Image (cartoon, coloured by chain):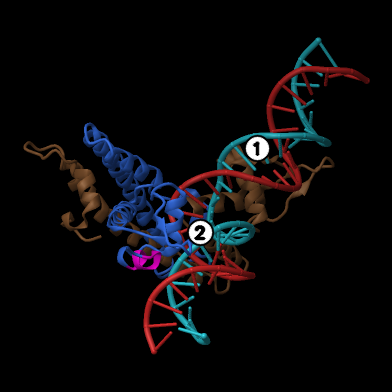
Chain colours: A brown, B blue, C red, D cyan
Amino acid sequence: MFSIGELSKRTEVKVPTIRYYEEMGLLSEPERTEGNQRRYDVAGLERLSFIKHARDLGFSIEAISELIELQGHPDRSCQAATDIAVSQLSDVRAKIKRLRALEKELVRISKGCDGEGVSQDCYVLASLADHELCRHEH
Amino acid sequence: MFSIGELSKRTEVKVPTIRYYEEMGLLSEPERTEGNQRRYDVAGLERLSFIKHARDLGFSIEAISELIELQGHPDRSCQAATDIAVSQLSDVRAKIKRLRALEKELVRISKGCDGEGVSQDCYVLASLADHELCRHEH
DNA sequence: TGTAGTGTCTCTAGTGACTAGAGGTTCAAG
DNA sequence: CTTGAACCTCTAGTCACTAGAGACACTACA
């Protein structure tokens, strides 16, 4: 049996976050000592590792709830779980696309001041003030 | 002079967001009608456009505050403004890097169920439960 | 057995950048 | 002069935590 601090060390999830997951219903309520402290078993540890891994991959608490729900129904879990993962993947790809566009514009903006013969106005500030200066869409 | 709704349409910033920016000190308090409604001039419009553009590029409210501060001191604003933009750029690049790693793993995970001869366990759920299945670091 | 020090408990409030809603007032068009 | 949209302030909610207060529990050592 692990204390909450022990669990925290093993999973690298902070103590208040563990309590938060419990409150959100991601973790079932563990046993308690006589003094009301939480004591976890291996199942609790595995469940938390699952949550941690999914969070690291950017799944929302809600999506993780669904995945956990699915774990209880092995009959038709696979397609549904794959759907969630695929949807997460398309989110990630959309974010990457957007960030690439931002990267381009930021490169352009932050290079503006380096050249010679630059006017006294700051190119960064001017670029932000005047959208017409953008060469890329965003 | 524009009403807040007019300003909202022209900048595509929602009305409550404009009031929020005012509260955060990004926008100075505009004139008011006798009936206490906000009335903006062209300077207000330009300021809000600047903020909108910077937000679209992912600058935080705090960073935008600094940029606005710098606009008032043209003498040494350029280097400082460029620094902020460069720092924003490196944030963006770090995010892209991380998202690419996530993308790889999600592709791997969500393909797991497609092949033939897959066991009855769901590969998505198994992958999330067991970090050892990861081939990529994240 | 006593005690010191660390860990844990609950509860509330704060973060960032908004968004939603209640309940009331003002403006502009017809 | 009336109607209805736009506006006002204020509070609370979002997401996924994080921080802090004040009190209680556990463990190691004397």
Q: Is residue B92 above or below residue B81?
A: below
The answer to whether residue A64 of the structure is visible from this angle is yes
Residue farthest to the left, as pictured: A117
Q: Which of marks 1 and 2 is nearer the N terminus?
A: 1
Magenta segment: does it hold B5?
A: yes
SS assignment for the magenta stretch, majority:
helix
> Circle 2 is placed at which residue position?
A60
Question: Amino acid under label 1?
Answer: Glu
Residue B39 painted magenta: no
Residue range (magenta): B3-9
Question: How many numbered marks have been drawn onto this rendered protein structure?
Answer: 2
- Which label was assigned to residue A6? 1
Q: Nearer the viewer, residue B113 or C10?
A: C10
Amino acid carrying mark 2 in the image: Ser
Q: How packed is label 2: few (under 14 Cα within 10 Å), some, or many (20 or more)?
A: some
Which chain letter goes with mark 2? Answer: A
| Chain for numbered disc 1 | A
Q: Quadrant of the N terminus of chain A?
A: top right
Residue A47: x and y, percent? 61, 53
Q: Please, what secondary structure does the residue beneath circle 1 have? A: helix
Q: Residues within 10 Å of mark 1 (few under 14, many from 20)?
A: some
Query: What percent of the width, then of the height, locates residue C21?
Result: 59, 70
State which quadrant residue C7 falls in: top right
User: Residue at (35%, 45%) from the top-left corner?
Assistant: B64
Nearer to the camera, A17 or D27:
A17
Task: State the SS at label 2.
Answer: loop
Q: Left or right: where does residue B81 sit relative to residue B117? A: left
Q: Position of residue A24 (x, y in %)?
A: 64, 57
Look at discs 1 and 2 and give the one toward the viewer: 2
